[in-house]
Amino acid sequence: MPFTPDSELDLLFPASLISQDLKSQLHPDVHIRPLASTDHARGHLTVLSVLTVATDLGEAAWTAQFNAMRAAPQTYYSLVIVDKHSDRIVGAGTVFIERKFLRGLGSVGHIEDIAVDKQQQGKKLGIRIIQALTHISENIGCYKTILNCSRDNVPFYVKCGFEEKECEMAKYAPAKPNAQSQPKAQPHLNAQSPRL
């Protein structure tokens, strides 16, 4: 599949929010851009599967989730790195914006679902994704950008300028007896520990 330029895609948010300086730091064989409405076909879920099970409920369900995210403007900023030779996704990440009553009605950027294709790991794509998401968060006015990660990934995030603060707690909902009864698209993202 030939590389598809941004101008031919239906993007989740304006590509201009991604730093031009950061784009110039990428290898010329890859391109960073917002998630597009046709990225199911480019292997978005395949890349996310390096994190955890990424069940493919089909293109229609994936597109419904994309549209639900777009229906919450200025909230979800999912981006991807695409291999220009294959037009396949090789990296992905999201920052979503939490609006608060604290800090003078401030906003916090939450980084989630950082994933890099196993064959592309070690090429600094994960760092570039984190830098791009942090740039978006800071430039839309968030007073801080936070993330949760496994203990093994702490050194990576320290290299990206993050510091350990507090601790994460989680309570998972009970498993549904029939996975088919779960909704096909939900308007939120599930927190994952990034693996790079």
Image (cartoon, helix red, strand yellow):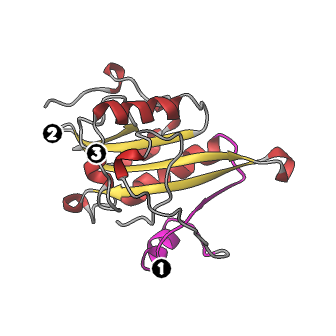
Q: Residue 49, position in %: x, y?
A: 29, 57
Q: CA distance from mark 2 to mark 3?
A: 21 Å
Q: Is residue 141 magenta?
A: yes
Q: Residue 48, position in %: x, y?
A: 33, 53
Label 3–label 1 contact, CB within 8 A: no
Near-viewer residue (180 or 138)? 180
Please identify the residue farthest to the right as the structure is shown. 104
Residue at horizontal 36 percent and vertical 43 percent from the top:
80
Between disc 2 and disc 3, whose residue precedes?
3
Vertical placement of residue 134 versus 146, above or below: above
Q: How many neighbours does mark 2 have within 10 angstroms: few (below 14), some (14-19), or many (20 or more)?
A: some
Residue 168: image tag? none
Q: Which residue is mark 3?
A: 56
Between disc 2 and disc 1, whose residue precedes?
2
Q: Is residue 30 magenta?
A: no
Magenta region, residue range: 140-164
Please identify the residue farthest to the bottom as the structure is shown. 151
Q: Which residue is mark 1?
A: 151
Residue at horizontal 34 percent and vertical 60 percent from the top:
124
The amino acid type of the residue labelled 3 equals Asp
Residue 86: image tag? 2
Q: CA distance from mark 2 to mark 1?
A: 34 Å
